[in-house]
Amino acid sequence: MKKGKSDNLRFARRLETVCGPKAKGAFRSFHGHVDLWPGPAGKPPVDFSTVECLISAAAVSGMPFGFVGNEYTGTR
């Protein structure tokens, strides 16, 4: 990963292939950065070992990424 030189989403797709078929589509581009979504569209949520692989691969590669999850937005 080269800061300012690499396409983050393209690089993330390569990381997904390293982590196996369950990881396909786990990363998404969101406002110019890459996020790890809890469940790719049309698929069940990614299992723990796949998420662990994706996080480890991203961390080792130096790829900047974030998490998108459910937040409570209701009122009491």
Image (cartoon, helix red, strand yellow):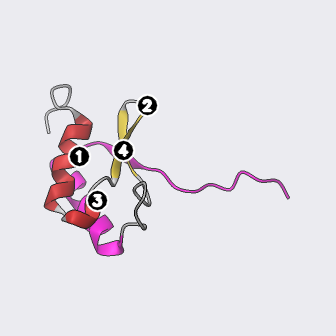
As shown in the figure, which amino acid type bears the numbered disc 2?
His
Is residue 60 within the magenta segment? yes
Residue topped by disc 4: 28
The kind of secondary structure element at disc 4 is strand
Report if the CB atoms under discs 3 and 2 are less than 8 Å apart.
no
Closest to the camera, between mark 1 and mark 3, is: 1
Closest to the camera, between mark 3 and mark 4, is: 4
Q: Is residue 43 left or right of residue 63?
A: right
As shown in the figure, which amino acid type bears the numbered disc 3?
Ile
Q: CA distance from mark 4 to mark 2?
A: 10 Å
**Residue range of the region highlighted in magenta in the rendering:** 47-76
Task: Please state the horizontal and vertical placement of residue 56, each as a whole percent of the image.
Answer: 23, 61
- What residue is at 20 percent from the left and 39 percent from the top? 10
Q: Callout 3: few (<14), some (14-19), or many (20+) C-alpha neighbours within 10 Å?
A: some
Q: Which mark is residue 55?
A: 3
Task: Please state the horizontal and vertical placement of residue 37, each as a whole percent of the image.
Answer: 42, 54
Say which of 61 and 6 sits in front. Answer: 6
Q: Callout 1: few (<14), some (14-19), or many (20+) C-alpha neighbours within 10 Å?
A: many
As shown in the figure, which amino acid type bears the numbered disc 1?
Ala
